[in-house]
Amino acid sequence: MKHFPEKLQHKLNQRIASNSLRHLDTNSNGVDFYSNDYLGFSKSDEIFNQTHQLLVDQNITINGATGSRLISGNHSLYKETESLIAEFHNSEKAIIFNSGYDANLGFFSCVPQRGDIIVYDELSHASIRDGIQLSNAKAYKFKHNNTEHLEKVLKLHANNTTTQEIYVVTEAVFSMDGDHPDLEKIAELTQKYNANLIVDEAHALGVFGNNGVGLTQKLQLEHKVFARIVTFGKALGCHGAAILGSENLYSYLVNFARSFIYTTGLSPHSIATIQIAYKQLSNNITEELHTNIAFFLSEIKRLQINHLFIPSNSSIHCCIISGNEKTKQIAQQIQNKGFNIKPILSPTVTEGKERLRFCLHIYNSHQQITNVLEQLATFV
């Protein structure tokens, strides 16, 4: 076998030296405070059984899509599921992608054109940044959740030409912080500067708004947004994503989004699971989740560790530790007590801002929340 390239080995050695080398671990039997399965849908027997029954009722017995959606893979479940998603989210159209990463890569690599401007939050997800890198547009970042800085950037780059488009990108909930932007102010600014607003709702779907519709709809801003990205691997407990937007955007993505065009479609079972998961969303479920979120916040205050946490009212709560070694050590000590929690290390987050990331679910008991936080309080 040919030797492993020296440049690549050097990069691996750098990760080892900084104690940030990633490994793939199998799931343990500890209490779940690390998964994105906020509503417990991935473990739902009801969703599993209803998905199977939907396939039986429609006499669908194939295991795969058999090809890209533009060739043989556009099976009947796609159309009805996309219609359901569009109606649920009060959107003209929804187009399903194989993952949230594929959706963001496809959108940002093909929609902004040469001469256009992309303005994005500095903490935007890697999938957004990777899509932007593939774009021919010029991109500029603004300080995290800082609407004053966003306006400065918009003022600097906005012009009166009729051909230039400006795209402003943010997330409804930021995955490594758990916080959310002032979406109403951002929508106001995008209208003021005639810009197109794109919101990634990955960690807001199933969490905010009536029946978990997301933050944009909770604030009744959906008609002020050019596109929304909703992903199904978080609260919906399955796989895939959709881009919500106009009829024209739908047609454009079918024709130009390479991550949509040049990949095998999702299997009928995957699409059926998405459909059933949407039908399971209800206010009762989201209220249960927010009860646990409120209890978590009250406990970190009682234990006087709230100052270590990034302010959040989402399912994600991050305790800043600082230092890869210290963060990993504390995570391991908490794991040894029977709680599944993961350290978030640099370079995933900024050096010096390493953290423990707590994800809350409807199935976490108040006693479990108290116990894990009392453990944390003894180590920080």
Image (tube, grey):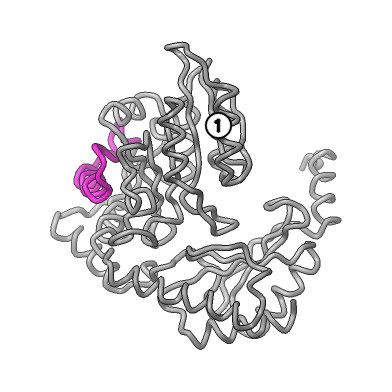
Identify residue type, mark 1. Answer: Val
Q: Compared to 106, does 166 lie above or below?
A: above
Write down the quadrant of residue 226 in the picture.
top left
- Residue underneath mark 1: 119
- Circle 1 packing at 10 Å, graded few (<14), some (14-19), many (20+), is many
Magenta segment range?
68-94
Residue 105: where, in percent of width, then height? 50, 36
Instruction: Give the number of marks.
Output: 1
Q: Is residue 79 left or right of residue 364?
A: left
Q: Residue at x 66, y 79 (%)?
A: 304
Q: Is residue 345 left or right of residue 81?
A: right
Image quarter in which the N terminus is found? top right
Q: Compared to 251, does 52 lie above or below?
A: below
Image quarter in which the C terminus is found? bottom right
Q: Does 352 lie within the magenta span?
A: no
Q: Residue at x 33, y 54 (%)?
A: 218
Residue 215: where, in percent of width, then height? 39, 53
Camera-side residue of 321 and 363: 321
Badge 1 marks a residue whose secondary structure is strand
Q: Does 72 lie within the magenta span?
A: yes
Camera-side residue of 129 and 168: 168
Q: Residue at x 55, y 33 (%)?
A: 151
Residue 67: where, in percent of width, then height? 34, 37
Q: Residue at x 57, y 21 (%)?
A: 157
Residue 165: where, in percent of width, then height? 46, 21
Camera-side residue of 355 and 251: 355
Write down the quadrant of residue 278 in the picture.
bottom left
